[in-house]
Image: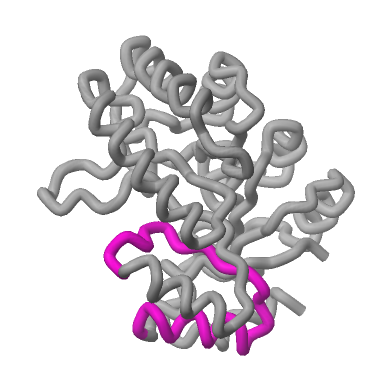
Amino acid sequence: MPRFAANLTYLWAELPYLDRFDAAAEAGFAAIEVQQPYDVPAPDTLAALNRNGLQMVLLNAPGPNYTGGARGFAAVPGSEKRFDYDMRRAVRYAQTLGASVIHVITGDGAGDAAKTTLIDNLKRVAATLPDGLTMTLEPLCGESHPGYFLNSFALAAEVIDAVGASNIGLQFDSYHAQQITGDALGAFEAMQPLIRHIQIGDAPGRVAPGTGNIDFPALFEAIDASGYDGWVSAEYRTYGRTDKTLGWMR
């Protein structure tokens, strides 16, 4: 079976943030990820990690937009300086917390100008990204993120190829893959050479594995067969007590 991590933005959302780390460790997880850890001082999150022996895997960039504007602007022309600023902040958090993956949120947009902006931004950061850190791009489905620029695996592959750096790759999310292509397993097999991080949730609805229409035993078998040795992070809505949704791990 793959190595499973817990996304603490979704799992144990019924608990205060720092208590979620204790719950994840008690449930048997060895690693976690947090989409937006920026509201809590990094030393507090680090202490929660250390007291439970947990590894931090991933965080998102940019952080929350407290002005109420759109979250994510890597593909938004004219936002280059803001992108650079937030990437520096994300790198500091990642290094402090020991995370190795930064998921870059592209923001909304379409067309050649957005694609060129995204590629140029990623090239610039890739050239200076500290060793041990990887940027990922995740295609998001229109049902969850209407208007999002990176809305297909073909586009993600095109951008990654154009950046041409070893420290950027694909973030594969089973929920989004199923919604975008109708075949999460087929999408995984097609995109496997580019994949640097995996997240799982069932479709439709981003629910617990085994409660939707994705064949997770087949997907887990394919992940094992592919030689992927990274973390597979559970990212789904629990609608109540998270502990009651973890049967899929067995």
Along the horizontal axis of the image, is 155 left or right of 72? Answer: right
Residue 168: x and y in percent read: 58, 32
Q: Is residue 242 left or right of residue 107?
A: right
The residue lying furthest to the left in this view is 67
Q: Residue at x 69, y 32 (%)?
A: 194
Image x and y of residue 196, in percent: 66, 42
- Residue, x 72% and y 53% (percent of image)? 230
Please identify the residue farthest to the right as the structure is shown.
225
| Residue 30 quadrant | bottom right
- Residue range in magenta is 16-40
Where residue 191 sits, quadrant-wise, is top right
Residue at point 33%, 44% (across, down): 62
- For this view, does 181 lie left or right of residue 83? right
Does the stretch in magenta take in 25?
yes
Q: Residue 169 placed where, x, y %?
A: 61, 34
- Against 78, residue 182 (above or below) is below
Tell me where residue 104 sits by quadrant. top left
Count every numbered label the image shows and give the total: 0
Is 26 covered by the magenta stretch? yes
91 or 173, which is in the foreground? 91
Residue 195 percent coordinates (x, y): 68, 39
Residue 194 as seen in the image, left or right of residue 58: right
Decide which of 235, 86 is in the foreground and name it. Answer: 86
Residue at screen point 37% across, 33% down: 106
Q: Quadrant of the C terminus?
A: bottom right
Q: Is residue 239 above or below residue 89?
A: below
In the rendered view of the protein, which quadrant contains the N terminus?
bottom right
Q: Nearer the viewer, residue 159 or 56?
A: 56
